[in-house]
Amino acid sequence: MKAERTAVGYVRCSTTMQATEGVTLGNQRERIEAYCRFKGLTVAEIVEDAGLSGGVNRDRPGFLHLLDIIETGRVTVLVLYSLERLSRDMLTLLALERLLDEHDVELHTLEGLIDTSTPDGWMSFAMRAFMGEMERRQIRHRTRKAMQYKRSRGEVVGAVPYGCQRNGAHLEPVAEEQATIAKVNERYQAGDRLADIVRWMNEEGIPTRAGTPWTAAQARKLIREYAGSFKKTASRMGTATRQFIEAIA
């Protein structure tokens, strides 16, 4: 039988947040405990993820443990300092709220005063989930634009491509690697298949950056006008999302 008004808390801090905002794990824990005392809730456990980003759920052991606790039916309330401590990903938040609803668990936050036990509280939760998703996409958009601008100026963004080396913020050609690229393109234009080119490179002992044998994926990047046709396959995330959508319909 489920315990009467028993709460589980969840706290998370990235190292950046601790340094810049001061919302430490201890601060969150104290605020959650004070809130539970005020609301007459018995705290069963406060789960934490220390120094971890909220970006990848499976990389957060505390978050996964929290899901286990919810599924046991031992608690009636999940208490957070703020919704962002859980995630900024709207799909994650909406899916979690559906899981909480399945197990009759309310979601309360101190910041924003969300309480999903009421329709108005659920609306507040949904709006904050939407705003968090918007902020996440804005950050991604700004980052992408900044990288495009750097590329337009010839600056190095990400990994240095084969055939070049870093010179400060810019790239300069590597003669030996450029010669390999030229030979690869020459063979491709003469009618060699990608598999033939890979076999030739490995038989000739042409080194990759890592010193490992060439693969088709690596060689394909060297061909300027590669005409292969590929169909984008569904990722595990895409497959799971499809199953989730079908399950809740």
Image (cartoon, helix red, strand yellow):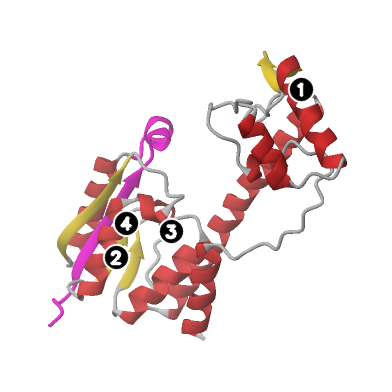
Secondary element under disc 4, as helix, strand or loop, is: helix
| Residue situated in front as seen by the camera: 32 or 217 | 217
Quadrant of residue 76 in the image?
Answer: bottom left
Work out how far the residue at label 2 is from the one at label 4, CA to CA, in angstroms.
Answer: 6 Å
Q: Earlier in the sequence, mark 2 or mark 1?
A: 2
| Residue situated in front as seen by the camera: 213 or 23 | 213
Residue beneath disc 4: 63
Residue beneath disc 2: 67
Work out how far the residue at label 2 is from the one at label 1, CA to CA, in angstroms.
Answer: 52 Å
How far across and down, in percent of the image, does residue 176 sit?
72, 17
How far across and down, in percent of the image, does residue 16 sit?
42, 33
Q: Earlier in the sequence, mark 4 or mark 3?
A: 4
Please give the name of the residue rendered at 21% of the width and 66% of the height, measured from the top-left corner.
Answer: 7
How far across and down, in percent of the image, does residue 102 sit?
34, 81
Please give the name of the residue rendered at 55% of the width and 62% of the height, measured from the top-left corner.
Answer: 235
Q: Earlier in the sequence, mark 2 or mark 3?
A: 2
Residue beneath disc 3: 112
* Residue 38 vertical placement versus 140 (above, below): below
* Left or right of residue 167, residue 237 in this image: left
Q: Are the residues at dot 2 and dot 1 in contact (C-beta closer than 8 Å)?
A: no
Work out how far the residue at label 1 is from the one at label 3, CA to CA, in angstroms.
Answer: 57 Å
Q: Earlier in the sequence, mark 4 or mark 1?
A: 4
Work out how far the residue at label 4 is from the one at label 3, CA to CA, in angstroms.
Answer: 21 Å
Quadrant of residue 52 in the image?
Answer: top left
Residue beneath disc 1: 178
Say which amino acid is labelled 1: Gln
Image depth: mark 4 or mark 3 in front: 4
